Amino acid sequence: MKAAQPFQNAHLRVRYERAGFTLVELLVVMVVLAFGLITLLMMLKSASANNADAHFLTVAQKLAEGRLEQVISDRRTQSFAYITNANYAAEDPVSGFAGYRRTVNIYYVNLGNLDAVSGSSTNYKRVDVAVEHTATVSDFPPVEVSTVVTSH
């Protein structure tokens, strides 16, 4: 039995000498972690930019809808004749919203084709409101909303 003890101690000594990581293993782990961190940071930057674009589009949508609601309200409180381009000047910037531009275009249209501008006065006006964010880096089109108001 005494012969078995040195063999067991030698086995433990080999295990003890191999415990831990080598320098090469540490470098490999550091490179893998660096690539993972870089990828994560790039995804975070992309998500942040997309979030900003969504914010700008949401604000533009609300500004367009707000102006359209004002036109509809003016139709009820003023008159059909009041709904003209002269009463809804372009805003650049929109009051209280720096970096946003809002335009309103009003056209006479025929009942049969609400997309085609009529050459003469009719009982129908199409109201187009467009809002864009002028300070964004992204290339997205302006937000546009439309409705038709009638003289009835």
Image: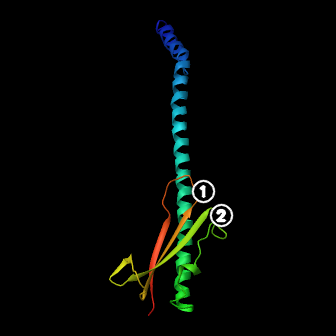
Q: Residue at x 56, y 19 (%)?
A: 23
Residue 129 can be seen in this image:
yes
Q: How is the image coloured?
A: rainbow
- Residue 93, by quadrant, is bottom right
- Residue 151, by quadrant, is bottom left
From the viewer's perspective, is residue 106 above or below residue 122?
Answer: above
Instruction: Report the residue that reaches farthest toward the front.
Output: 119
Reading the image, the residue beneath label 2 is 98
Q: Position of residue 128 (x, y in %)?
A: 48, 74
The kind of secondary structure element at disc 1 is loop
Query: Which amino acid type is marked by label 1?
Result: Ala
Q: Which one is in front, 56 or 6?
A: 56
Q: Residue at x 53, y 19 (%)?
A: 24
Q: Which one is in front, 22 or 91?
A: 91
Instruction: Report the residue that reaches farthest toward the right.
Output: 96
Structural distance between the alpha carbons of marks 1 and 2: 9 Å
Q: Position of residue 139 (x, y in %)?
A: 50, 54
Reading the image, the residue beneath label 1 is 135
- Contact (CB < 8 A) between labels 1 and 2? yes
Give the class, few, some or many, for how many residues have Cα within 10 Å of label 2's Cα (few <14, many ≥20): few
Instruction: Report the residue that reaches farthest toward the left.
Output: 112
Q: Position of residue 31 (x, y in %)?
A: 53, 28
Query: Which amino acid type is marked by label 2?
Result: Ala
Give the class, few, some or many, for how many residues have Cα within 10 Å of label 1's Cα (few <14, many ≥20): few
Q: Which one is in front, 150 or 32?
A: 150
From the viewer's perspective, is residue 97 above or below residue 7?
Answer: below
Residue 22 can be seen in this image:
no
* Res 94 label: none
Image quarter hosting the C terminus: bottom left
Left or right of 96: which side holds 62? left
From the viewer's perspective, is residue 67 above or below residue 80?
Answer: above
